[in-house]
Image (cartoon, rainbow, N blue to C red):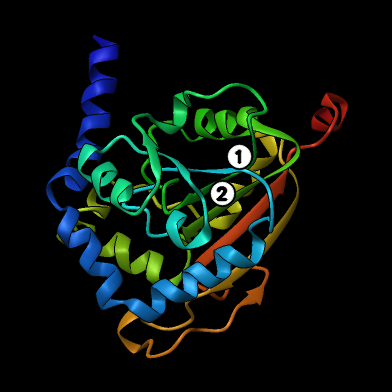
Amino acid sequence: MEELQLVDKAMLKIEPFERHTVKYEEWFEKNIFAYKSELQAVRHLLPKKGTGVEIGVGTGRFAGPLGISTGIEPSKAMRQVAQKRGIEVIDGVAEALPFEDCQFDFALMVTTICFVDDIEASLREAFRVIKPEGFFINGFVDGNSSLGKYYQNHRAKNVFYKVATFYSVDEVIPYLKKAGFRNLTFTQTIFHALEEIKEVEAMKEGYGEGSFVVVSGMKPVQDYDILN
C-alpha cells in the first residue's frame, strides 16, 4: 500500500509536465531574459570540462546550451522534446539514478529540487554518481525570495508549482552537507519581478537578494572528509 502511495505521489508531480509541455516551453520564450539570466548564473559555477549529467533535464533548456549530453527525466513528453535538442535522455527519477558509482565529473539540477519526492535520497544519489573532487550544481528558486513567496502564494493557479515544495537556501544547505558535499559556493540572480526583466540581469556572489540561487558543492576525495 505504501509503495502504491509513493507511485501515486510521483505521478501527481509528473502529470503537469506530461500535459502542459507546450506551456512549459512558452515560459522560456515569454521570460527570455530571466531564462538567460538563470542560464548565465548556472554556467558561472558549472565546471568548464568533464562529463556531466542533468538530473530532471526537462526539455533540455539548460543541458542543451550548457553542452550536457546526458539527462534523466521521468516525463515522457519532456524527454521527447529534450531528445530533439540532441540530449540522450533516460527515463528515471532523482531518488534512484540508473548510473554507476563515480560515473560523472559533475551533476546538475535546475528547478528540480522542488519536485523530488525525497530530497535526502536525491542528493545522496547525486553524490554517489559523481567522482571524487567532482561537483554538484543546483539551481533553484529560493523559497524566501520575492519570487519564491509569489509562487507559494499563487500555487493554486500554477499548473506546475501547485505540486512543488519551495526550499529556502538555509534549508537546502544542511541537506547538501548531510549528503556529503563540501566547499559550497553560491551565486544569485533575478532581482526584479519577471515582467520587469528586459535584459539579462547581473550576477552576485552569495544569496539572500536574488530569487534564483545556484549552489555548487564538491565531493571530497576521502570518506574521512565527508564525516568531518
Using the rendered view, name the quadrant where residue 15 is placed. top left
Name the residue that disc number 2 marks. 171
Q: Residue at x 50, y 32 (%)?
A: 122
Percent of width and height locating residue 171? 56, 49
Percent of width and height locating residue 100? 59, 21
Q: Which residue is drawn at 27% across and 54% down?
A: 161
Percent of width and height locating residue 153? 27, 63
> Of the residues tagged 1 and 2, which is closer to the observer?
1
Q: Residue at x 57, y 69 (%)?
A: 41
Which element carries disc 2, helix, strand or loop? helix
Residue extending furthest toward the top: 1
Using the rendered view, name the quadrant where residue 46 is placed. bottom right
Figure check: 57 above or below 201: above
Circles 1, 2 touching at the beta carbon (< 8 Å) = yes
Residue type at mark 2 is Glu
Labelled disc at residue 175? 1
Is residue 211 at all visible to an observer of this figure? no
The answer for how far apart the CA atoms under marks 1 and 2 are is: 7 Å
Picture quarter with the C terminus: top right
Crowdedness of circle 1 by 10 Å Cα count: few (<14), some, many (20+)?
some
Residue 142 as seen in the image, left or right of residue 170: left
Total labels drawn:
2
Which element carries disc 1, helix, strand or loop? helix
Residue 213 as seen in the image, left or right of residue 198: right
Percent of width and height locating residue 9? 25, 29
Figure check: 67 above or below 135: below
Figure check: 50 above or below 194: above
Picture quarter with the N terminus: top left
Crowdedness of circle 2 by 10 Å Cα count: few (<14), some, many (20+)?
few
Q: Which residue is drawn at 36% across and 43% down?
A: 115
Along the viewing direction, whichever of 222 and 116 lies nearer the viewer: 222
Residue type at mark 1 is Tyr
